[in-house]
Image (cartoon, rainbow, N blue to C red):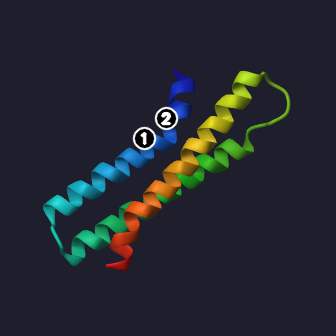
Amino acid sequence: MRAWSLLLSGLIVWAIHFFGSYVIASIFPGTMLARALILILTFFCLIADGYLLWSFSRAPTHGGDRVNRWLRSSSALAVAFSVIAIFWQGLPAALG
């Protein structure tokens, strides 16, 4: 179970941002409040992804078996994709 939670951690943060931003945009369509809430949500999700990347980078890379190293590197890659997706989704709120 821990392996799945590590692999999906970045994608879960992205899913929270995705659904949260669409819920906010549905409740407050086209308002400054919606843009501000989406920016706040984006900020906190990027902080969560930053924490995940930090925790994956602090794990020892030497020793251990290949499966654990693959698990950490794949999880870090998923979090990196999550950072890109969250930034891309939050960009219209920042520019609009």
The residue at 45%/55% (across/down) is 85
* Front one among 51 and 21: 21
The residue at 15%/66% (across/down) is 28
* Front one among 15 and 60: 15
Distance between the alpha carbons at the discs numbered 2 and 1: 6 Å
Q: Are marks 2 and 1 in contact (CB under 8 Å)?
A: yes
**Total number of numbered discs in the rendering:** 2
* Front one among 32 and 70: 70
The residue at 33%/51% (across/down) is 18
Q: Quadrant of residue 44?
A: bottom left
Q: Can you tell which mark lies on residue 24?
A: none
User: Can you identify the residue that label 2 sits on?
Assistant: 8
* Image position of 33 with respect to 69: above or below: below
Q: Quadrant of residue 77?
A: top right
Amino acid type at image mark 1 = Ile
The residue at 38%/75% (across/down) is 94
Q: x, y (%) of residue 60?
A: 79, 37
Q: x, y (%) of residue 56?
A: 67, 42
- Few, some or many residues within 10 Å of mark 1 (<14, 14–19, 20+): some
